Amino acid sequence: MNLERVIFGFFIILSLTFNFVFVIGDIDNPMHHSVWILTIAILVNLIATGLKLGDRSQVGALLLAASLVADLLLITARVVWVIYQNDTLQGPSAESIVTIVSLAGGALIANIVSVIILIGDTLMSRR
Amino acid sequence: MLVLRYMRRPIFVLIIVYAIGITGMALIPGTAADGSPEYMSLFHAFYFFTYTATTTGFGEIPSEFTDQQRLWAILCLYIGVIAWLYAIGSIIHLIQNMHFVQALSEYRFSRVVNRITEPFFIICGFGDTGSLLARGLSDHRFTAVVIDRDPERIKALSLRDYNVTMPGLCGDPSEPRHLVDAGLKHPQCKAVIALTSDEDVNLKIAVVSRFINPKVQVICRSTSTKHKEQLAPLDNVRIINPFEIFAQLLSMAIITPRLHNLNSWLVRAKGVRLGVPLDVPSNNWILCGYGRMGQWLHKYMKLNSINPLIIDPDIESSSGIDRFIKGYADHGTLSDAGLDTAAGIVAGTDNDSDNLNILMSAQVLNPKAFTIVRQNHHANQLAFDAASVDLILQSSLTTGRRILKYLISPHIQILIDYLREQGEQHTEKIVNRLSTSIGDQTPHLWSVTLDSKHAKSATELLNAGHIINIGDIIRHPSRRCESLSCVPLVVLRTNRPIMLPENEIQLFNNDSILFCGTEQSEQLLASTLNNTYTLHYLLTGKEVARGFIFQWLGQLAEDKKSSTA
C-alpha cells in the first residue's frame, strides 16, 4: 500500500461524491440543493486539481484535464448562484436552480471520467 | 489538363453550336397566349436548346411555337445532337487510347507514391521472390512500391490483400523515369531491390539508382561474378546471390543444425519448433546436379570437409572433382552410386520433376537416407509438401527471407554469422534462453533506439545520470521480478555490436538494441521506455512521487529524516 496513492484516490473520489450529493434531487426544486455542499465540492475539487499538477505521464495529463473541466463548471455554477440568489427570499428561483444544477451535472461527468481513469490506471499497473 | 487539351476541338464545336442555336431562338418572334408577338429571353432560349440538344425534348415551352420558330427548332435539334455525339465520341476515343490510359495510371501512381509518409522500399520485379518479399514487408507493416514489366503481374499485385498499400507500376524498371516515378528521390525511400529475371537489368537498376539517389540502399540479385566485381566497390550496394545463399543455408543445416533450427525459427519457417534441430548426417552424401547451384553447394560442402559423390550428365573430369558419376540421376545411376548405403542425398537439379524423381528413387532404395531437395518453382509447393522430405529449400523463398531480414533487422544476420563462428554450444545457450522466454509463441524481431523520439523517458533518466542496465528495462511493468517474454540479441553502439548482451550490460544514449520476443512484449517495452514513472520503478523498485505537492512532501520528509540522523 502506498500512502501517496491513498491520499490521491481519496480526494478524487471525494470530489465525485460531493458533486453527486449536490446534484441529486429534483432539478427545479431549490430545497434539494444546498449552497454549502456546492462550495465544499468546489474546495475538494481544487485540492484534487492541485494534487494532479506536475504528473508528467499521459494518464496524469488526462486526469488534470478532467479536473480542470470540473473546476470550471462548478465555479460557473457558484457564480450563477451568486447572481440569482436574491430571486426569492429562500434563494434562487426554480428557473435559476435548473441552470445551476445542470452546470454541476456537467462537472459530475468530468469527475466520473476522472475516477474511471484512476481505476483503469491502477488496474493496468497492478503493482 | 491532358483531357482538356485533347477535348479542345469538341468543346469549341459545342460552344459554337450552342451560340448559333440560342441566338437564333432569341431573335425569332413567337406569339404569346393572348396573340401578341413575344420574344424568347436568352435564358429561355438556352433552356430550350439544352433540352433539345441533349434529346430530352420537353416540348414547346412556354407557349406554342410559330412556324418560323419550329423551322429553327429543327435546325437546333440536328446540329445540337450531332455536336454532342461528336463530343461524346471523342471522350470514348480518348478513354480507349492506350497511351492515354498509361499516362493516366502513371500519373495516379506517382500521386500515390508522393503521398507516402512512412519509410518505404522499391521492389523491381514481382516474380516469386518479389511477391514473397512484398508479403513479408506487409506482415511487418512496411510499404513497398512495385515495378514490373509484365501487366499481368501488376494485376496480380492489385488483387493481393496486403496490410498496407502497395502501389504497382507496369513498366520497364531499368528506365530511370519509372524509378523516379516510383519514389527513388522521395526522402522516405529506404532501399531499391532489383529482383528481375534479367541480371543485366538488375545491374542497370543498381547503377541508375546509385546515380540518382546515392543515399538509398541498393540490393541487387545477381549470380555473375562479373557484376559482383563491378558493384562491390560501391557502398550502399549489396549483391544477393541466390545460389550462394542457398548453399550457405544447406551447409548450415548439415554442419550446424542447431543454428539452422534457430535461423528457420526466426524467419518463421513452417513447421519448425525451436530447440528441435534436424538430425543431419555429416558425411557420405550424394549430390545430384552440378550446375551453377551445384557448384556453390559443392564449394560450401568442401569447405566443411564433406566430399559428396556428384551425379550430373554434363560433368567434366578435368574440373578437379574426384568423386563423380557422369549421367542422369535415374534409378539405375542412383543404385550404382550406392544410394542404399548413403547417409543423405541432395536433389539439387534445376528441374522440379527431376528432383521429385530422385526423391522417389531414394524412398525406394533407401528410405532412411536424409533427403534435401531444391524446389525451383513456388507453384509446385503441394507436390513437395506431399513427398515427405526432410528439408525443402526453395531458392526464391530463401532469397526473399534473406532480403527481408536485411531490410527489417539488418543486425540479425551479423548475429547468425557470429554464432556460426562461435560454435554449437553457444547457439544452444541462446536457444535455451529463447525457448524459456518465448516458448511456442511466434517470434518477432524488432529493434529499439534509445533516443528522444523512441525512448523519451529512458534518455531523460540517462541524461539525469541514472544507470540503466539492459536487464532493468526488460523487467515486467506489473511484476518487477519477472521479465518480459523477450530476449535482447544485439546491442549496437556506434557500429560496434555487442552480441548476446548479459543483463548487466549498461546502456547509453543512442544505443540500438535488437530484441526477439512476442509482439505484446514489444508494446510493453515501448510503453516502459516512454513512461518515466514505470521506468523509475523498474530501475529502483520504488514508486517515485507524482505531482508537485507529493514531491514537495516527500522532500520535506527526507530532510526531516536526515536532520534527525
Image: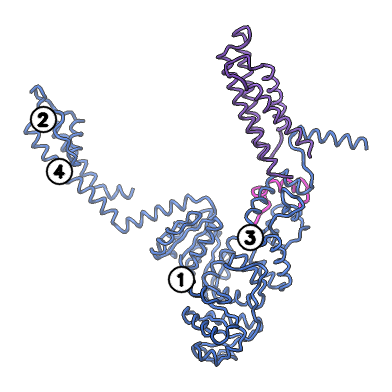
Chain colours: A purple, B blue
User: Callout 1: residue from which chain?
Assistant: B
Q: Do the residues at pointers 1 and 3 share their chain?
A: yes
Q: Badge 4 is on which residue? A: B79
Q: Quadrant of residue A43?
A: top right
Q: Give me the C-alpha separation between circle 1 and circle 3.
A: 29 Å
- Highlighted magenta segment, given as a residue range: B442-468
Q: Where residue B36 sits in the image (x, y, percent)? A: 8, 22
Please give the label number shown on residue B379.
Answer: 1
Q: Do the residues at pointers 3 and 2 share their chain?
A: yes
- What's the amino acid at mark 2? Glu
Q: Is residue B450 magenta?
A: yes
Horizontal side of B270 relative to B127 (left or right) equals right
Mark 1 or mark 3, whichever is nearer to me:
3
- What's the amino acid at mark 4? Ile
Task: Give the mark, 1 or 4, whose residue is nearer the N terminus.
Answer: 4
Task: Give the mark, 4 or 3, whose residue is nearer the N terminus.
Answer: 4
